[in-house]
């Protein structure tokens, strides 16, 4: 089973539309961390946000917001008023300690196309 | 400050040849990660080091793959002999000292490997 599932392979929106990228994770740990990374066409993954399992407070950073719900094991990412520069592949990731080993899992990514 | 540096950026080789990918982490980071990205399997963690010591190599696909970190500023990922199915983008990432599962990872630009 996938530890991190991003069911949306590709999404296309028109500039200024809002868009939500879904992420569902699976873990038995009580302590874990969730991340979102952005991979622009240049290829390098860029860190966007981290959430720990004990902090379900939603976060907003400019046009970006994140909704963490432990009850549904989801950590969704919303871009408000999307812009062409938001076009990229977005990855959700989970890190946890499993049998005293640190484990790092990435979802398959969601490609976001923002058209002018 | 320089980010994670990887070389070469592109590598084209023939099946059976040895391939060596190189990575220089960010100064002061003591975790180093090697990932492989393919369309079929997404982003997979191959191995990671802490203070130059390999901690978890369970993601290394087979004995043809080996990784070393002779000092804090240099790591190599070697494939010998290479096969067409090794074609992928290989990323190196590094993170700060402390809790590996907590700290965000800083990714290099990747090496696109094509094995003919």
Image: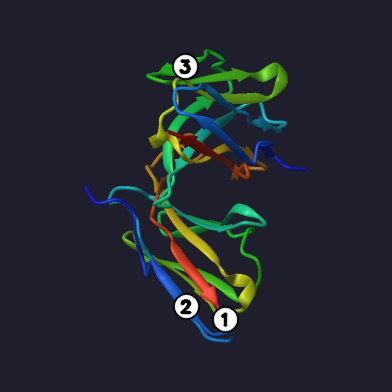
Give the vertical position of A64 relative to B23 (above or below): above
Residue A48 point in image, percent of width and height: 43, 32
In the image: residue B23, left or right of residue B39:
left
Q: Between tags 1 and 3, which lies in front? A: 1
User: Which quadrant is the C terminus of chain B positioned in?
Assistant: bottom right
User: Label 1 crowding class (10 Å Cα cut-off): few <14, some 14-19, many 20+?
Assistant: some
In the image: residue B5, left or right of residue B79:
left
Image mark 3: chain: A
In the structure shown, which secondary structural element does the residue marked by tag 1 occupy?
Answer: loop
In the structure shown, which secondary structural element does the residue marked by tag 2 occupy?
Answer: strand
Q: Name the residue under label 3.
A: A59
Of all residues, the one furthest to the left in this rendering is B1
Residue A39 point in image, percent of width and height: 46, 45
The structure's colour scheme is rainbow
In the structure shown, which secondary structural element does the residue marked by tag 3 occupy?
Answer: strand
Of all residues, the one furthest to the right in this rendering is A1
Q: Between residue B36 and residue B76, name the one nearer to us.
A: B36
User: Label 2 crowding class (10 Å Cα cut-off): few <14, some 14-19, many 20+?
Assistant: few
Residue B86 point in image, percent of width and height: 60, 71
Q: Distance between the residues labelled 3 and 2?
A: 43 Å
Give the vertical position of B65 relative to B60 (above or below): below
The answer as to whether the residues below labels 3 and 2 share one chain is no
Find residue B116 and name its label: 1
Q: How many marks?
A: 3
Res. B63 visible in picture: no
C-beta proximity under 8 Å, tags 1 and 2: yes
Q: Quadrant of residue A9?
A: top right
Q: Between tags 3 and 2, which lies in front? A: 2
Q: How far apart are marks 1 and 2 (CA)?
A: 7 Å
Q: Which residue is drawn at 36% across and 68% down?
A: B7
């Amino acid at each position: 089973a996938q530890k991190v599932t991003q069911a949306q392979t590709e999404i296309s929106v028109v500039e200024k539309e809002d868009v939500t990228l879904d992420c569902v994770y699976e873990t038995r740990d009580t302590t874990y961390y969730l991340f979102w990374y952005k991979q622009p066409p240049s290829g390098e993954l860029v860190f966007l946000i981290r959430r720990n399992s004990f902090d379900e407070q939603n976060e907003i950073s400019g046009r970006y917001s994140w909704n963490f719900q432990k009850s549904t094991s989801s950590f969704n990412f919303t871009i408000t008023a999307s812009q062409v520069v938001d076009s990229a592949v977005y990855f959700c990731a989970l890190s946890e300690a499993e049998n005293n080993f640190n484990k790092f899992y990435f979802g398959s990514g969601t490609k976001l196309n923002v058209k002018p | 400050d320089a980010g994670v540096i990887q070389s070469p950026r592109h590598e084209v080789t023939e099946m059976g040849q040895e391939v060596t990918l190189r990575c220089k982490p960010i100064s002061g980071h003591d975790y180093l990660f090697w990932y492989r990205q393919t369309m079929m399997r997404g982003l997979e963690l191959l191995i990671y080091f802490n203070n130059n010591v390999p901690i978890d190599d369970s993601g290394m696909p087979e004995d043809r793959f080996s990784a070393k970190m002779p000092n804090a500023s240099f790591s190599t990922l070697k494939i010998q002999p290479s096969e067409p199915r090794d074609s992928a983008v290989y990323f190196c990432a590094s993170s700060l000292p402390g809790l590996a599962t907590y700290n965000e990872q800083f990714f290099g630009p990747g090496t696109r490997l094509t094995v003919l």
